[in-house]
């Protein structure tokens, strides 16, 4: 945990990426953790299963979308 400093969860990316990039990745990760709106039932029940693959808990549909967010 000593290396994380200000970058929070992006600390694991190490020094390969600059601070700007890490800040961007962090912003994306915060959005990822939130549930996304399902394009079928319009409920906030879509969770990311893998990059670009989302599953809606409400209508049980699995669909592909943007790697990080649905919209
Ligand atoms: Zn749905």
Image (tube, rainbow, N blue to C red):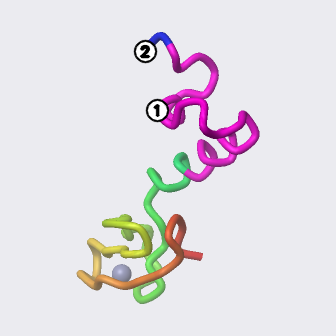
> Is the shortest distance between ligand 1 and the CB of mark 2 under 8 Å?
no
Seen at 43% across and 60% down, the residue is 35
Tell me the quadrant of the picture where the C terminus can be found: bottom right
Query: Front-most of 15 and 33?
Result: 15
The image quarter in which residue 51 lies: bottom left
* Percent position of residue 61, x then y: 28, 85
What is the secondary structure assignment of the residue under circle 1? helix
Q: In the shown orientation, is residue 71 left or right of residue 33?
A: right
What is the secondary structure assignment of the residue under circle 2? loop
Q: Sequence-wise, which precedes: disc 2 or disc 1? A: 2
* Dot 2 and dot 1 residues touching (CB under 8 Å): no
Query: Front-most of 26 and 16?
Result: 16
Q: CA distance from mark 2 to mark 1?
A: 10 Å
Seen at 44% across and 68% down, the residue is 44
Q: In the shown orientation, is residue 58 left or right of residue 33?
A: left
Q: Which residues are magenta?
A: 3-28
Query: Front-most of 10 and 31?
Result: 10
Residue identified by numbered label 1: 12
Query: Residue 1, which numbered label?
Result: 2
* Percent position of residue 36, x then y: 48, 67
Tell me the quadrant of the picture where the N terminus can be found: top left
In which quadrant of this rendering is ligand 1 seen?
bottom left
Seen at 23% across and 81% down, the residue is 60
Q: In the shown orientation, is residue 57 left or right of residue 67?
A: left
Seen at 63% across and 46% down, the residue is 27
* Percent position of residue 54, x then y: 37, 74
């Amino acid at each position: 945990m000593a290396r994380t400093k200000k970058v929070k969860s992006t600390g694991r990316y190490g020094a390969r990426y600059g601070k700007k990039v890490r800040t961007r990745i962090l912003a994306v990760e915060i959005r990822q953790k939130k549930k996304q709106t399902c394009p079928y039932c319009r409920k906030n029940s879509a969770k990311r299963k893998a990059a670009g693959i989302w599953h809606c808990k409400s209508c049980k549909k699995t669909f592909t979308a943007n790697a990080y967010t649905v919209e």
